[in-house]
Amino acid sequence: MARQIAKQHNILTPAPAGAARLTVTQLIHQFTAWLAQTGRTKPGNYPRLARQFIRYCLDNRLPFDTGSLRIYGAGKKGNQLSPVRKFLFFYQMQGCPAVVPDSPAGKQMPAAANELILAFLAEASHLRGDRSKENYTRALNVFFHYITEEQAAGRPASFSARTIGQYVNDLRRRGLSAFTVNFYLSAIRQLTEWVIKHRNRLGLSSEQADDLRDVQAIRGLSIERGFYKDSLSEAERDALLAVIDNPADRAIVALLVLEGLRTVEVTRLTVGDIAFDKEQVHVLGKGKSTRKAIKLFTPCANILREYLHSETGIPLSASRASLLFPDLKTAHIRYVVDKYLKALGLKRPKMSAHSLRHTTGQIMIDKGVEPMWVQRHLRHELFETTQFYIKKQTERDYFVKMPDRV
């Protein structure tokens, strides 16, 4: 098995260029890069709308031309069609290459990439939970798919420091956020560390291992350490809780906006985690294996009691290990939060379910709670994270609190 993986790992050497046909994803990636190169640094929804048109044509066996666009565009708005017209112009510039559907899910990546990724994830003890492994799988698949595309286009590409550097530059040109680019790079770095550690089992040469060590020197994108998430004011927070009639929804939102829990932490709560007598909530944090107690505030405790005694609440006979919200997923939490934010007109570009956690921290700082206690309550590993709220308060109050003269 190790030798098989080693052979597969020798995606380290470039493969010959493939056929001239492009998959839908390959064509969309090229279209996205072209948009960026022609001045549209943030392609926006152009790639998504172009992909919909391509799929429509493939499903109906239509050519990619203006005639098909007229059929496809019946009843659609102009802003849905202008990106497709842009795509058709690009497609004709490329010489109208043949396009085939993407392979079924799970088969888009070369077997070599899949085997290497699976072997890495099987031993990645620091990745707890299926969601983390799914995210890493997705990030690594994107990289190996990039290698395959480059090789198919006749350009040298391999699992090497040089290709990884080029890949990071390509992600930046596509307009991906610094957070996404840095996460993708982090996943690749961890994979290379694992490969180097197991180089003998994988059959890597000393030269290959030395090349992969250079990956650690590749720099990610700088991130402005600011407030990329909005937060509610105290009045907006109270209005949000007041508008929710559903006991379960109200309890979920209360845990987010009053206690400052993360969405995934809410899904993990059990009946035994709520200690009304001690005024505590025991939270299984992100990436943690043990629970940590935080203070259960009275308003949140009252809302949780209402939920538990409602028709939709957990039966009083339920065991302490029973989930407080059975079958709850983070996607559903995001849907619930967005629904009520929109109902109140509070949904803004940077306002999300995670913003409710920021709301807790910001209101605590605004009310004069000591920053070290805010850090403890929100379970920030770095005090720098807590300082964001102080900085935001300072920026907001500066012109109000500065004297008229000094």
Image (cartoon, rainbow, N blue to C red):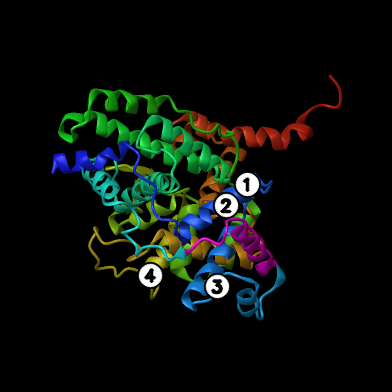
**Front label number (2 vs 4):** 2
Q: Which of the marked residues, 4 or 3, is nearer the chain's N terminus?
A: 3
The amino acid pointed to by label 2 is Thr
Q: Which of the marked residues, 3 or 1, is nearer the chain's N terminus?
A: 1
Q: Which residue is mark 1?
A: 36
What is the secondary structure assignment of the residue under circle 1?
helix
Q: Residue at x 62, y 39 (%)?
A: 366
Dots 2, 1 in contact, CB < 8 A? yes
Q: Residues within 10 Å of mark 1 (few under 14, many from 20)?
A: some
Q: Which of the marked residues, 2 or 4, is nearer the chain's N terminus?
A: 2
The amino acid pointed to by label 1 is Ala
Residue 41 lies, in percent from the top left, at: 65, 46
Location of residue 253 with respect to 385 vertically, above or below: below
The extreme right residue here reads 405
Residue 223 lies, in percent from the top left, at: 56, 34
Q: Which residues are magenta?
A: 79-98
